[in-house]
Image (cartoon, coloured by chain):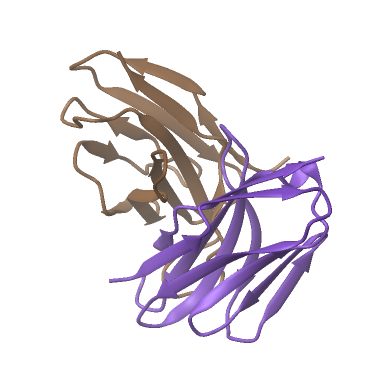
Chain colours: A brown, B purple
Amino acid sequence: DGGITQSPKYLFRKEGQNVTLSCEQNLNHDAMYWYRQDPGQGLRLIYYSQIVNDFQKGDIAEGYSVSREKKESFPLTVTSAQKNPTAFYLCASSIRGGGSGRNEQFFGPGTRLTVL
Amino acid sequence: EDQVTQSPEALRLQEGESSSLNCSYTVSGLRGLFWYRQDPGKGPEFLFTLYSAGEEKEKERLKATLTKKESFLHITAPKPEDSATYLCAVLATDSWGKLQFGAGTQVVVTP
């Protein structure tokens, strides 16, 4: 059964802590994305990756870091430098990104991060 | 700068009462417009992609249409299970896969 998994579903962070959110896909998609969703706002892009070992900053990358060592995995670390990390985090993937035709992005179930 | 505006912010419908959601956009060039459905506490579920003005796509009680400036999502004879937030996103021709999302329309269908 193909899809995107995110873990954990809920995550609590203390002040000054770094936390890592997991995202795995078995769709054989080249491109992966991380978004942040806040109430009343559209999804905002944090980071994206077109291929393994390559990633680019999105609109709100400050305080976040990512890695893409495997095609199926794109973990997101929320560092202590992110001042307002409480939000719903969504991972997505697409067959490929860039200038190709197929750009539909498919989303995982999300991780809700709360700062204590 | 690319912009996507959805209206209304919220919509309350009686079961069977058809209505339309609007997504107006400003982009330098449109590669694609996407509609998603999102249930509370869950990730968005892909519905449609529209690529050019005049294109229409249908799925059950939903029909999406596209003009050069906006897209409509028509909900025909809605049922309570159609209650969700509907998100619109655009992909510009000069964008490397970055979707610009609207804030969404929250739809509640009452029996």
Q: Residue at x 31, y 53 (%)?
A: A55
> In which quadrant is the N terminus of chain B drawn?
bottom left
Q: Is residue B35 left or right of residue A49?
A: right
In the rendered view, would you say A25 is above or below B36? above
Q: Is residue B44 left or right of residue B29?
A: right
Out of B50 and B12, give the one closest to the viewer.
Answer: B12
Q: How many marks?
A: 0
Residue B97 seen: no
In the rendered view, would you say A88 is above or below B108? above
Q: Residue at x 58, y 79 (%)?
A: B51
Q: Is residue A32 left or right of residue A1?
A: left
Q: Position of residue B71 (x, y in %)?
A: 57, 73
Residue A107 seen: yes
In the rendered view, would you say B89 is above or below A52? below
Q: Position of residue A69 (x, y in %)?
A: 37, 42
Q: Residue at x 77, y 61 (%)?
A: B18
Q: Position of residue B37 (x, y in %)?
A: 63, 50
Q: Residue at x 51, y 85 (%)?
A: B68
Q: Position of residue B55 (x, y in %)?
A: 66, 82
> In which quadrant is the C terminus of chain B drawn?
top right
Out of A45 and A87, give the one closest to the viewer.
Answer: A87
Task: Tell me the quarter of the picture where residue A14 sits.
Answer: top left
In the rendered view, would you say A12 is above or below B29? above
